[in-house]
Amino acid sequence: MTSAGSVGIVGSGPISQGLATLWAHAGYEVTLGARSAASASVVTVPDTVRVGTFEDAARHDTVVLAVRHGGAADVAKRLAPHLDGTLVLDTMNAVALIGGRAASALEPGVTEGQWLASLFPGATIVRAFSHIQDELLASRARRTPGVWAVAYATDAGAERHRIERLIDDTGYVPVFAGPLARSSILDPGGAAFPRLLTGTDLEGLVTAHRLPEMLDRFNTATIGAVLHEDVQWSFPYGPTIGVTETVHGRQAVTEHLARVQGSGIRISDIRTELETPTGAVVHATGSFPTPRGPISSPIVSIVAVRDGLISEVNEYWDTAAIR
């Protein structure tokens, strides 16, 4: 029988055993690296999986890191010489509890993928299999393959086909979440963590997470590229300052927003909350030209997404401040 490929998995916990099982059933040659002989003795994986050391697992073109995050830096020092030029999948999470809620324990503004990339500058880092509970990882993929999804992030666009094949062969639907710098959706505190979603729902959630960069296109009059053809954009308070309340369709909305942008209005500090597979609440600061000089005002929008695009916006301003 011809192998579908080979994968090394560093770590022997539930995530490691689940992935080893899925890839083994898909025909891969899998090496699972355990920290010690004692750890190796309690591993439960198919007979075709070789159980060895961390170094054994690291001697593959594709390597998964699935160790406890607290020990990851030491493991990185140990394995770095083996991983130059390797595709490294990072499943780990630095979890902190803040006010009873899961959050990233890393420095603010640093994603897990960026952190790991700093430890392995010669490797190609992929953030994947990080947002699904370990007890569901193998069972859901084997019971209903092709239904549930795994989001991944990487800076290596040329490797996306290879990455998606690896994910697809486990039984999950691959969904690209973007580059490592914008992969916080997959980290503790992110909208996808810890969640098991269908492909359609996860694609919608990723789109909602991208809304700040999509809406920032208003400032360069290129927002038409991210609007659904049936988009509806409403300004419920617009009539009080002489602005049309609702505009329908991509062309009409694009032209309307181009006129608004041409008048000197700009938006900044765009951020989301309550990200869902169908949209999000978006906060921003608007700069509005007035006879008295530019006026800043908060903007709150309820934004819906569909098919990876913006499909509906209800935008609210402090109209009293910008009259």
Image (tube, rainbow, N blue to C red):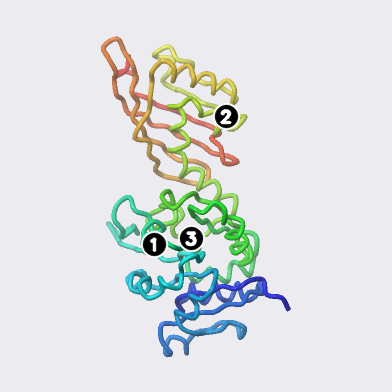
Mark positioned earlier in the residue sequence (1 or 3): 1
In the rendered structure, find residue 213 and report the number of the disc placed on it.
none
Left or right side of 178 for 264: left
Reading the image, the residue beneath label 3 is 124
Q: Position of residue 145 (x, y in %)?
A: 65, 64
Disc 1 or disc 3, which is closer to the eye? 3
For the N terminus, the quadrant is bottom right
Q: What residue is shown at x 56% (from left), y 48% (from top)?
A: 203
| Secondary structure under the numbered disc 2 in the rendered image | strand
Q: Amino acid at mark 2?
A: Val
Circle 1 residue: 116
Residue drawn at x 29%, y 24% as measured from the top left = 296
Judging by the rendered image, the residue that carries numbered circle 2 is 231
From this viewpoint, which residue is outermost toward the right? Answer: 1
Q: How packed is label 2: few (under 14 Cα within 10 Å), some, or many (20 or more)?
A: many
Task: Give the amino acid at mark 1.
Answer: Leu
SS class of the residue under badge 1? helix
Residue at horizontal 32 percent and vertical 70 percent from the top: 70
* Secondary structure of the residue carrying numbered label 3: strand
Q: Earlier in the sequence, mark 2 or mark 3?
A: 3
- The alpha-carbon separation of the residues under discs 1 and 2 comes to 39 Å
Q: Nearer the viewer, mark 1 or mark 2?
A: 1
In three-dimensional space, the C-alpha distance between marks 1 and 3, rounded to whole angstroms, equals: 10 Å
Compared across the picture, whether 106 is left or right of 306 comes to: left
Image quarter of the C terminus: top left
Vertical side of 299 occupied by 127: above or below = below
In the rendering, at what x and y percent does residue 224 appear?
55, 28
